[in-house]
Amino acid sequence: MTRRTLVLVALTAVVLAGCLGGPGTETTTDPMDSNGTATVSSENIPGISDGTLTNATALARANEASLTETGGAVQIRRDGPSSQSTVDLVVGAGLTTYQLTGLQSAGDDTVDADIWSNETTRVIRTSYDGEYNYRTTDRRDDRLNVLVAVEDYLAAGNFTVANESTGNGTVVFTADTFVTPTDSHGPLTNVSSLDGRLVVRESGLIQSLTVSATTEEESGSYSYELLRTGVDRVAKPDWFDDVPAGATLQTQLNVDVENSSYLVVRNEGGDHVPSNTTISVTSNNTTSTATLDTSLMAGDTRYAYIDATTGSLQLTADRPTAGTVDPVTSPVSVSITTDDGASLYSAGMAWSSETASAPETGGSSGSAGESSPTGSS
């Protein structure tokens, strides 16, 4: 069976809040000329050679390192034909803390996501259709996806020096030609026209980046703006006191579609899933829910299926028999939420019709993906 992960919560464990952590202090260490104006040579900027951006990876990593060293705040916007998103990220110096606030809209659906993290723990809050879900996870990876993704847009254009120095310690680059990516899964593919502008400091700290791209059928844009630097630590958000006890559960849930008919929910380790937890399944534009009557312990399995007679979602410890199931259709999404509002799992999957009868192997992890500004992921 061929399956791809669906974007259910497009702002991920990278995560946010309503306050941006205080005003911070703008700092720069650029050399000054005799008139007190910062002077910058483009050749000293990481990834730049002969006035051209030749190594997008080097510049993106220099930007990430510079921002996380001193702390700062950035805003990132994506605008595509089918979805729009805005992310506000505040990083404490040394990446000891960070906060991400994001809004994703696609059609009539809008998702808000907030994440606050200290050195060891991420606390995630998502809001959809007026309901809040919470989750707490171990912080295993200090890299922030929204900063890493800048590389894809830097690599998309042939950025060359437009102005050696603006007089405020930055160099301006522009791009009007698309560079075909070596990875066909990047955010920009089959682009017919591109317009880009990059303003960067000598350290590699990006002041702003804008990219607008057009294909034969649609257009999209991406913008990245540095709001300030010099943020020491990011305080806990106001909603932190609302995080339920269930959000601290560390489960290892895996959900598969078996025979394109029903779901297999496994707790592969970690904490138990408490009784009264709700499993929600959306298939064929219909959402059905059922509640665990007993805890799902590590190593336990439950089968979730739509009853062919009643149309209700059923949970059982035994594999359902043929004829009793109304098969789920691709795509399908699944969420698992405790009775106090903690989100233990949220993900989706899809499979091709020509291989739909094949048994499902593997499973989706339940962590949401990040969508691209032009609608491709």
Image (cartoon, helix red, strand yellow):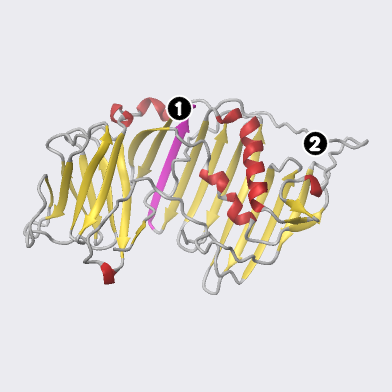
Q: Is residue 53 visible?
A: yes
| Stretch in magenta | 108-119
Give residue 204's quadrant in the image: top right
Q: Amino acid at mark 2?
A: Asp
Packing grade of label 2 (10 A; few <14, some 14-19, many >=20) is some
Residue 187 percent across, percent down from the top left: 53, 59
Choose the circle earlier in sequence order: 2 or 1.
2
Above-or-below relation of 34 to 329: above
Q: Is residue 92 visible?
A: no
Q: Residue at the spot x=62%, y=60% of the render?
A: 156
Residue 85 percent across, percent down from the top left: 49, 51
Give the number of the disc on residue 120: 1
Residue tagged 2: 30
**314 vs 88, nearest the viewer:** 314
At numbered mark 2, what does the secondary structure look like: helix, strand or loop? Answer: loop
The answer to whether the residues at label 2 and label 1 have Cβ atoms under 8 Å apart is no
Above-or-below relation of 217 to 50: below
Residue 134 percent across, percent down from the top left: 34, 35
Residue 374 percent across, percent down from the top left: 51, 61
At numbered mark 1, what does the secondary structure look like: helix, strand or loop? Answer: loop
Q: How far apart are the alpha carbons under marks 2 and 1?
A: 34 Å
**For residue 56, side relative to residue 332 (left or right):** right
Above-or-below relation of 345 to 350: above
Residue 185 part of the magenta segment: no
Above-or-below relation of 59 to 329: above
Packing grade of label 1 (10 A; few <14, some 14-19, many >=20) is few
**For residue 9, side relative to residue 324 (left or right):** right
Q: Residue at the spot x=93%, y=35% of the render?
A: 34
